[in-house]
Amino acid sequence: MQENITILEPGRAEKNYWLDLWRYRELFLILAWRDVAVRYKQTIMGIAWAILRPFLTMVVFTVVFGRLAKLPSEGHAPYALMVFAAMLPWNLFSSSLSEASNSLISNANLISKVYFPRLIIPTATLVTAFIDFLISFAILIGMMVYYKFVPGWHILLLPFFVILALLVSIGPGLWITALNVKYRDFRYVIPFLVQFGLFVSPVGFSSSIVPEKWRFFYNLNPMVGVIDGFRWCILGGKSEIYWSGFLLSSIIIALFLWLGIYQFRKTEKTFADLI
Amino acid sequence: MSEIIIKAENLGKKYIIGHQAENGRYVTLRDVLMQNARSLWLKSRDMLKGKIYIKGDTLEDFWALKDVSFELHRGEAVGIIGRNGAGKSTLLKVLSKITEPSSGRVTIKGRVASLLEVGTGFHPELTGRENVYLNGAILGMTRNEIRRKFDEIVAFAEVEKFLDTPVKRYSSGMYVRLAFAVAAHLEPEILVVDEVLAVGDAEFQKKSIGKMQTVANEGRAVLFVSHNMGAIQSMCQRAIWLDGGRVMSDGISRNVVQQYMESANTGSVLYTPEPKDGYTDLIIEKIILKNSQGEVTTTVSSGEELRIEIYYKALKRLPKPYFWIAVRSRFGSLFGANMLFDAARPEYIEGRGMIACIFNDIRLLPQTYTIRLGVRHQNAINNYIRNAEVSFTVIGTAQDLGMAGETADNYFEDFYSLLVPYAWILPDGRTVPVNGFHSNAGSSLTPDLKSQGLDCESIE
């Protein structure tokens, strides 16, 4: 029986926090599984909804932005494919940000009664968004078959951009959820941010329509880098990637990630008292 | 002395509470606007400084725990008792690492499993089976552990038939049984339990206490918060009494329980006068219970003398009143004293005085009892005092009563209240006397089946 001595004192940093995270990894999986399992309980269509929703969104987007608005596509790739390639990371970002921001409050009963490293809660919400992402990715593959579009070697770099997309969401997600416990105002910020971001980010259009002199600063929006990267991977080089802008986006992502984890760890001890 | 596994030193936990100022000050619109502007400014300033925002005009420090120090040894079961709001749950939260102490420190050796609520994390949409895995993981069990114990858990909860229905369809009893079943199969080094046994029917409570007893007997340390003094005494060797966030007493559970019960009643007075019907010529001012040592108390040990003192005020001279007392348990009246039967009436009572009654040779089981008393007019029909009722508790464990049965402590409340000497004559001819039985009637000790027609040949 290993003797682990814990000392509880005001202001004492939890030495074994990261070790604890590993020890509680099963809880992480179970919480993620719970969120997924609960979604489609008592529904008739069940898992079919998970496929139907992104599919219908894709159709609407293509019709609105492609046929009606007549925005230019990238190179020779079909417009629908371009939009869908951007929707994948965008949905990953928006749903995981929304879920993560509210995760602590919705699990208040756990936080006030049981001990486990609280970081597990928002990170577990990423899993549900990721599963939706995988399903949408399957639809994307279906679309590529339909358009007889063959991706280049760039697509092998996709996992890297997926991880980047996850990081984009978890950084601000952690930051907001930590602050949300204390100041509930932040709950109202998220839907607005997501709505606004959808039009500001190059989801329905290509970032190449942004005028040259603003292109660099446009990348202050971290999703620009991620979406451009996704397009580049999927559409295989026909979509140009603006490397210096991409670097800026990556720096912003790293900054938010650090800020999020810092803020979360700093306020973690007071969650049970304030929630 | 076995190893210390929890050591708390001057533990303190502070909360900040806000108070609203008086409401009368909102006189003009200008006042309202000024107040709102001011509080908005203060809130923003606090937020930028990173301080916690507490709503209210004035703030106050509230110490939920103050200077709490104690030690818990391996294999020890300690009960924590106290009134509501004494800080018991806060103490458990600090020990479970859910909240941080504001002062002092706690050193813990080993893993702590906390049961602060039954069914933590249960999701109503998931089935019983799924919730067992969920709840088990939340409490800290690994998947393999849960899988191994799954059948045991379900058998303990008695919900085999409903395992695959969503938990929102369960009755509250099933819910609580399942939740406790999962928690009961934890195997931590230190178990911390908070009043979870307060829910559920008597059957369930008994099962839970039995299970906790097993855990304690297996040599794990248990910290148990409860309002059930019987459970505390039977399960815990030691008890800690918390009041207002401070440790009032720490020692053998029976003594601590006694001290707590005494303080829980206002002073040690059992009764305060209320306006009664009928005659108002007699007022009972105070009823006091004293134990064999003459100390005023509301708890007595089994076998002690019961001395009931009635302090009265007669507003005029009342001739030959009849006093009567009945001592009742939940099964009904057990015994009493009645001047209608004996010849002990006083000639008269006038002004302030005291009348006492002493019962001895009474052995009561540890339960809660009521003293009902009244005073009648000398015509034996009308009442000066129809009914005054006060309660007292008898405390003690199976050991104190000389009961050697293993399950004795669990069943004291269930069958009867009075301990009377008796003896069993067993089939093998042995006689087992209990409670000081000695036969004075020369009862035959050998079984005589033949005369009753019950021997082997007669039964065909």
Image (cartoon, coloured by chain):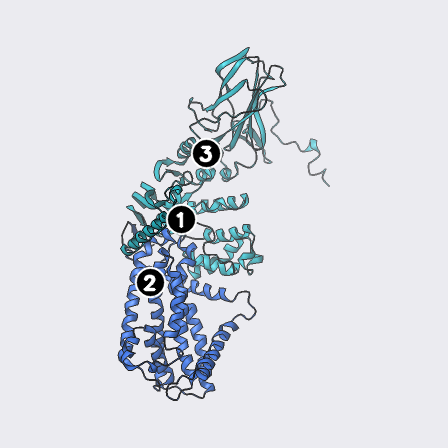
Chain colours: A blue, B cyan
Residue positioned most to the top: B347
Circle 3 sits on which residue? Answer: B399
How packed is label 1: few (under 14 Cα within 10 Å), some, or many (20 or more)? Answer: many
Q: Chain of mark 2?
A: A
Which residue position is annotated with label 2? A175
Give x and y (percent) for residue A267: 31, 56
Q: Mark 1: which secondary structure?
A: strand
Task: Classify 10 Å Cα crowding around label 3: few (below 14), some (14-19), many (20 and above).
Answer: few
Q: Is residue B306 at all visible to an observer of this figure?
A: no
| A212 lies above or below B12 | below
Q: Position of residue A5 (x, y in %)?
A: 30, 52
- Determine contact: label 2, label 1, CB under 8 Å: no
Q: Position of residue A259 (x, y in %)?
A: 29, 64
Q: Residue at x 45, y 88 (%)?
A: A148
Mark number, residue A129? none
Q: Position of residue B72 (x, y in %)?
A: 34, 43
Relative placement, left or right, of B202 versus B96 is right
Observer-nearest of B193 and A127 = A127
- The C terminus of chain B, quarter of image: top right
Amino acid, disc 1: Leu
Residue type of the residue flagged with mark 2: Trp
Are dots 1 and 3 on a single chain? yes
The chain that hosts pointer 1 is: B
Q: Amino acid at mark 3?
A: Gln
Task: Name the residue that disc number 1 marks.
Answer: B191
- Residue under the point 42% across and 87% down: A149
Q: Is residue A82 left or right of residue B109?
A: right
Residue B331 visible from this viewpoint: yes
* Residue B226 in the image: above or below residue B150: above
Q: Are marks 2 and 1 on the same chain?
A: no
